[in-house]
Amino acid sequence: MAFTFFFRDEHVLNLVAKQVLPELAGFSRIKFWDAGCAMGPEPYTLAIICAENMGKFSFRNLAITASDIDESGEFGSIIQQGRYRGEEVKRIQKDIFERYFTTTETDDIYLIDPLIRDSVKYQQHDLLSMKSIGSGFHMVLCKNVLLHFTPEQRVSVIRMFYDSLAPGGYFCTEQTQKMPDELNHLFDRVTDDGQLFRKK
Ligand SMILES: C[S@@+](CC[C@H](N)C(=O)[O-])C[C@H]1O[C@@H](n2cnc3c(N)ncnc32)[C@H](O)[C@@H]1O
């Protein structure tokens, strides 16, 4: 169930870079929540895309809270260490890989750049508790998670995301995930070619 990989759903993350990040330039604190983050490739991909598009100064103001129910109990330490096997990083574009990963003394283990690593903080959290981890988020990213829930649970979880967002904040999900009809009045869809929504 925790299947994930670096640069998954890159299309919608590039929409975030184009649509969301320019609006946040100049903010002293930028808060993103990555809900259902698995072992870290997703929040680290988001952080790398932000680093590539925001400039060094703004990037330092970015705080990504990555959460997962994590039945293994291991995601926190994997994410905190930012160490990944060659198998997990081999598909990353060469120039990006060279900018954000370094080799280690352990064979076939690569370490994510400390600046990227420090922008992500992990927290264990069950979305079905329907309790948010915080408020005032500028974006909630939740990909390939909602499909595991019932339609009723999906509505309640997205409503909880809505309440967790700052005014005008964004909700981003995978291409095949549709906004439930009951919630259409809460969000504007930002673009026809991606599942990026803005809180009304
Ligand atoms: C298929 S993975 C997707 C990972 C990542 N978002 C991606 O797109 O690559 C689904 C993740 O959702 C998490 N998950 C499932 N039920 C959850 C829940 N109730 N609360 C929080 N996370 C949950 C799983 O532990 C798993 O890491």
Image: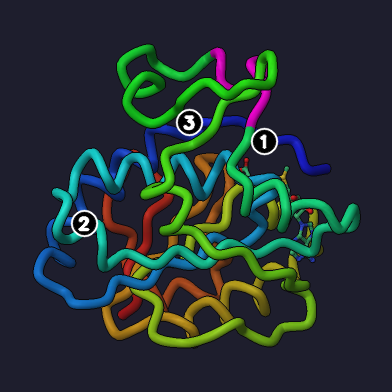
Q: Nearer the viewer, residue 57 or 133?
A: 57
Q: Is residue 88 visible?
A: no
Q: Residue at x 32, y 64 (%)?
A: 62
Residue 68: mark in rendering: none
Quadrant showing the C terminus: bottom left
State which region is magenta.
84-90
Q: First in sequence, mark 1 or 2: give its number.
A: 1
What distance separates the C-alpha of mark 1 from that of mark 2?
A: 24 Å
Q: Residue at x 33, y 60 (%)?
A: 189
Number of numbered callouts drawn:
3
Q: Is residue 139 visible?
A: yes
- Mark 3 highlights which residue? 7
Q: Amino acid at mark 2?
A: Leu
What distance separates the C-alpha of mark 3 from that of mark 1?
A: 9 Å
Q: Nearer the viewer, residue 13 or 55?
A: 55
Q: First in sequence, mark 3 or 2: give its number.
A: 3
- Mark 1 highlights which residue? 4
Q: Residue 20 placed where, x, y %?
A: 24, 58
Q: Residue at x 62, y 36 (%)?
A: 83
Quadrant showing the N terminus: top right
- Mark 2 highlights which residue? 21
Q: Nearer the viewer, residue 10 or 28?
A: 28
Q: In the displayed structure, would residue 140 be above or below residue 115?
A: below
Q: Residue 31 placed where, x, y %?
A: 37, 72
Q: Amino acid at mark 1?
A: Thr
What secondary structure is found at the residue carrying circle 3? loop
